[in-house]
Amino acid sequence: MATSTRATPGRDLRQEILHTARALLNDAGVSGLSMREVARRAGVTHQAPYHHFGDRESILAELVAEGFHELGRDLAQANTLAAHDLRGAVIASGRAYIDFALRNPGVFRVMFRPETCDPARFPAVQAAGQAAQATLIELVSMVHGAQASPALCMVYWAHVHGMASLLLDGSLGQECPMGPLRDTLLDEVTQTFATLVMGPPASAHTPA
């Protein structure tokens, strides 16, 4: 039986619900997330989640906004390398995006699905998504200057998002399980991408 929401004085039920919902997304995907199941797993009454969230989509919106904030911080941290190492920033940004997806599979899968969490209904989600996107645009601008363009930003995004999706939901995840093999693959892929968009590293050029 679910416990009372007042069973533990001082408990942060709102955060418990979000934490439980995040774990449920990882375990069962968005189709397995319901207000009743969140309540059951959190050990509270079936009505308790409604004290903090109007519906399931409101919980998803909170998790998606948090996801975009975290992703934006990770990408911004990678961008700091650009001041002295543009190539390193491109590689670090790629790893930051992919690593975020692998750490947060359930939330990542929902972040880019407006049919499950409509940004138009939740301004905080829209703002957080735009802020994360701005960090990617900033990187492309720093690397390519006047030649940066929306199409080039899309190339960067397609690279990292595609790689993350292949590892999470494609056969690549089974071929390269977590461990040294996956780390080596990601290092090679991100370095190869940097070479494609920037040319080979300076040390790789043959002296005249």
Image (spheres, rainbow, N blue to C red):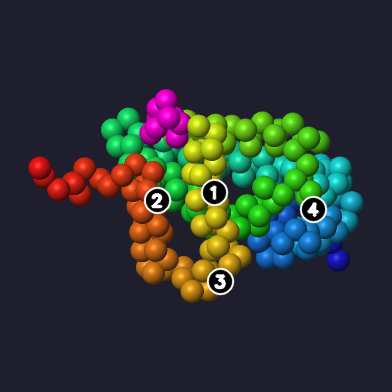
Mark nearer the N terminus (4 vs 1): 4
In the rendered view, tell whether residue 113 sits above or below residue 181.
above
Q: Are marks 4 and 1 in contact (CB under 8 Å)?
A: no
Q: Is residue 57 left or right of residue 152?
A: right
Any part of residue 63 in sight: yes
Q: Position of residue 116 (x, y in %)?
A: 78, 50
Mark nearer the N terminus (2 vs 1): 1
Q: Which residues are magenta?
A: 140-148
Q: Position of residue 32 (x, y in %)?
A: 78, 63
User: Viewer-proximal residue, 142 or 46?
Assistant: 142
The residue labelled by disc 1 is 158
Mark 2 vs mark 3, CA separation in Å: 21 Å
Q: How many marks?
A: 4
**Extreme residue toward the right, this view:** 47
Mark nearer the N terminus (2 vs 3): 3
> What's the amino acid at mark 2?
Phe
The residue labelled by disc 2 is 193
The residue labelled by disc 3 is 171
